[in-house]
Amino acid sequence: MDSKLKSKYPPSVLALGVVSFFNDVSSEMIYPLLPLFITGVLGAGAWAVGAIEGVAEALLSLSNVFFGALSDRMGRKKPFILGGYLVANSARPLMGVTSHWWQVLGLRSLDRMGKGIRTPPRDGLIALSVPAPSRGGAFGYQRAMDNAGAFLGPLLAFLFLHRWHSLRTLFLLAALPGALAVMVVFFFVKEARPGKGSSPVHGAQGPGMASPSGGRVFGPNFLYYLGALGFFSLGNSSDAFLMLKARELGLATATIPLLWMVLHVSRSLSSFPGGLLADAWGRKKVMLLGWAVYGGVYLSLAFLTSSALFWYLLLVYGLYYGLTEGAERALLSDLVSSGVLGRGFGWFHGIRGMALLVGNLLFGYLWQAYGAPVAFAEGVLCTLLALPLLVKVKVPEG
């Protein structure tokens, strides 16, 4: 591993990047092919795909909030990180031995609950392990490794299916990188606790989100931030719709895995530089730039008729992720105290998840009823509504 990374970030943060890489290799070997497995192998209808993903995403959002708060209450992060990865990587490969769609529903729900168990504590541990000025780069590194795994997973699936053609066997093989992810957590991730380097409570004046005991946990800046993320996520539809746009433009089905890999290459290559830029230039400024890129891409997609230009837009769209994924997590860690980081990240992921669920339903309805231009225009509108709330967030200094 690069010596500069080793000198700048503690071993646990570097290990969590490796964990994200292996976990996403496992996940993305399965996820893009799951709708085909449900409909083509198990013989269920498209409605079953929607039901499975809807229930799974709802459970993910609820578990984010619950387990983020529980990790704060217990004062430990690693048990939740280990447990979350263990649950997900135990359930996910078993989809290969299912015979009914409702069995996939149960396993997919466990997979997403595992993500909800681990993600807020994982993000909280990263924030606790790294000084505030370097958190953008730390989160950017984690997202870069995650996206690198999301590139390799479909590539491995493509190579395997080109030779052996068995979805069930492929799903079972996904257990191997998943097991590596769990082992790295167990052996190399160490607990982190609030210390003298932890950030104070920022923006706590005025009304805020209350704790069960009646004390104020989050200040208004955090609530403005959640509001901005909520509005933005209502228009931040699943990237699967981009693949649907590619089909509408006449791109062959065989190119869809290549498009998916191009997107994740762009995301992976831009995530770490984007996080470093957030540290150097400011988290909010980089997020605003990223949201502007998102709005510009969606506005272009609303009127796009060229399949050749779609490839270039996909590369630019990957930059949106690179500019925002590290910055938005680092900004959240600036807005809450170290003792409630798990709860803060729980609400962060929970609000986004519920808004994305509603946003995807709305986007799909608008596409079917009025066409792709109206659906993509809705994404631009939600971005415009979110920008004033993000601008209103006061970023603490020092």
Image (spheres, rainbow, N blue to C red):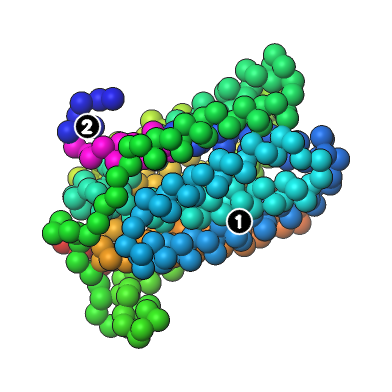
**Picture quadrant where residue 268 is located:** top left
Q: Which amino acid does label 2 sit on?
A: Lys
Q: Can residue 197 be seen in this view?
A: yes
Q: In which quarter of the image is the C terminus?
A: bottom left
Give coordinates of residue 234: x percent, y percent. 55, 60
Magenta extent: 8-20
Q: Is residue 185 above or below residue 288?
A: above
Which mark, by number, is residue 57?
Answer: 1
Chief secondary structure of the magenta span?
helix
Pick the front one: 41 or 98: 98
Left or right of 396: which side holds 367? right
Residue at which label 2 appears: 6
**Picture quadrant where residue 43 is located:** top right
Left or right of 280: which side holds 165? right
Give coordinates of residue 146: x percent, y percent. 44, 37
Magenta span includes 334: no
